[in-house]
Amino acid sequence: MTKHELAKTYEPNAVEAKWRAYWEEHDSFRTDAASPREPFVILIPPPNVTGVLHMGHILNYTIQDVVIRWRRMQGREALWLPGMDHAGIATQNMVEKALRAEGKSRFDLGREAFVDRVWEWKERHGGKILEQFRRLGASFDAHRMRFTLDPGYSRAVAEVFVALYRKGLLYRGNYIASWCPRCRTVLSDEEVEHEERTGALYHIRYPLEGGDGHLVVATTRPETMLGDTAVAIHPEHEATRHLRGKRAVLPLVGRLLPIVEDERVDPEFGTGCVKVTPAHDPVDFEIGRTHKLGEVRIFEEDATVRPGFGRYSGMKREAARRAVLEDLEAEGLLVKTDDHKHAVGRCYRCSTDVEPWLSMQWFVSMKPLAAPAIDAVRSGQVRLFPDRWEKVYFHWMENIRDWCVSRQLWWGHRIPAWYCGCGEVIVETAAPSKCPKCGSAELRQDEDVLDTWFSSWLWPFATLGWPEKTPELGRFFPSHLLATGPDIIFFWVARMIISSLEFMGEVPFREVYFHGIVRDAKGRKLSKSLGNSPDPVEVLDRFGGDAVRFATVLTTPPGQDQLYSDDKIETGKRFANKVWNATRFVLPYVDGAPDSPPDAARLPLAERWILSRLTAVQAETTAHLEATRLNEASYAVYDFLWHSYCDWYLEISKPALLDG
């Protein structure tokens, strides 16, 4: 094979492996903070350390790679910064699953040994997804790889926690939060997925004190009545006016319940009488605080009934519900049961029904932090594309609630708070040697770790060395583009804008590109259970990385879902073959060609025509890329190479070339 000959058949895996090796050998994607070139920065949405490649990743990372390569070709100092998230719940669950196979639990190992075990797992199995991205041809700067539990990153997390605490924006309190009985930790509101179900609405008779009649409450969860501490009515509801100042008797338990008046009661729900269970319902919790009611917890961490509740103790919540209903019916207190549609919260990680849980947790006050982030999008400092997501962003931000950031896990950033027997709470970036109030050295660190997203929201600047004023931070912050799915607009995107404005005084990026998700040809979400989710590595092996990348971008309109099919990927493969064969045909004629282009005015008509088409498609492609219309940019290239160049120009040129 001569210098300018290609193999007869295009073998994408061999060709792509060759170029990956070349890029790595020549450090092609390394960036320099001291470079005089204008920077362009994209930060990878860090995949979980437990993650494996799926088709959604291919869409997300191809979008980023197209843009970063284009900017690099324009002469920019183009940084695509990679990294991984420690993924608290997901990673801990993975290791606990392995322990269960050995007949052990994390409690058998103890905290220190368990965390060591997770680090061992991370070194053996973590990061597989980044190697798969390399197979895809991703051009990130591998020298700048970051992990959210790196020592420097951990320092940034501690600095932020302490700074928020000292500003009065982070507090600890006994509040209701969503609890996952499977993962044994609280969840933030955004980590709870709601599913509409058809359940039952149970109408239960509560006798009034002294045999003075009864009232009827309606509930979807009769088992929680064991924790009732009051009945509430609306102060202006005529039908319940006669109950003012009276007390009811809690069925099955005998506890006397005050009847309180509260405007949060919906008089149209049921009979207008509402059971109040402050330890197991967020609205009831607020009612309880207003009226100084007691809080009776009925569940253990695994959602079984606690000791002290008679025959119900030790029962799982479903069994307790059945037992309570049986006893109510036996005593003639179950009035009726209606079908009832309602939303049930589930853990986003394991799909277990969550339980409202009263416990001591750490919270971030989000309202004052959100205001500048709302202004940043409204003023255009940050552009959300497609712009329909602005409405979603504003609705969430304007109704934002305080963020519960503590988690009952062992894997993650341990909360930098220490407790002294005298009652003092010490919040510092490093362990204190003694209590500043009483001088005692007997201090106990908080057992909880921080929500994974508490470290992820610092990604735009913690990855660049903050809180140190590094050259990278000065050069590469803020970034220019964030490409991500809209499913984490609240988890991550909004919070990054908040944290960057608070700690850097500037927005973290200029544009957020929200792409859709990958579905099958019938529009269904890809799922192993449906059998419609292809193995991305097998797809890459079968079609080649370039074919998969090109077809993925070509067939995905901005912000819309991609409908995956092998036929669409086949389009990319055929195009790659077309380019290969055209190049193979032309290369033998390159020898002897002048180093500089000839005067275009003296060229034959066909050459002048193809050059004019090239100039036009360059401008068209650039305009589409500037507007983040990657599918239209891809089609412009496809149309030019397939039709203008191959079908017309090469065919016109063949007689002259073949005749010598």
Image (spheres, grey):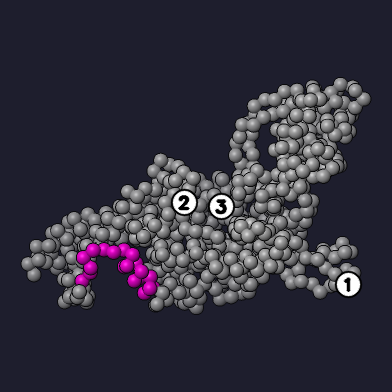
Assign the N terminus to one quadrant of the image. Answer: bottom left
Residue located beneath label 2 in the image: 515
The picture places residue 15, in percent across and down from the top left corner, at 31, 68
Between 150 and 221, the one lying in front of the other is 221
Q: In the rendered structure, does residue 383 fall within the stretch colored magenta?
A: no
**Tags 3 and 1 in contact by the CB under 8 Å rule?**
no
The vertical placement of 538 against 260, above or below, is below
Between 496 and 335, the one lying in front of the other is 335
Q: Is residue 426 left or right of residue 537?
A: right
Camera sees residue 161: no
Between 86 and 241, the one lying in front of the other is 86
Q: Which mark is residue 529?
A: none
Camera sees residue 517: yes
Residue located beneath label 1 in the image: 439
Q: Secondary structure at mark 1?
A: loop
Mark 3 vs mark 1: which is more N-terminal?
A: 1
Q: Is residue 616 left or right of residue 241?
A: left
Assign the C terminus to one quadrant of the image. Answer: bottom left
* Residue stretch in magenta: 5-23
Q: Amino acid at mark 1?
A: Gly
Q: Is residue 415 left or right of residue 425?
A: left
Q: Secondary structure at mark 2?
A: loop
Q: Is residue 660 left or right of residue 196?
A: left
The picture places residue 218, in percent across and down from the top left corner, at 74, 29
Q: Which mark is residue 488?
A: 3
The vertical placement of 361 against 166, above or below, is above
What is the crowding at mark 1: few (fewer than 14 residues within 10 Å), some, or many (at least 20)?
A: few
How far, Cα to Cα, is label 3 from label 1?
45 Å
How far, Cα to Cα, is label 1 from label 2?
55 Å
How far, Cα to Cα, is label 2 from label 3?
11 Å
The picture places residue 369, in percent across and down from the top left corner, at 67, 56
Between 534 and 633, the one lying in front of the other is 534
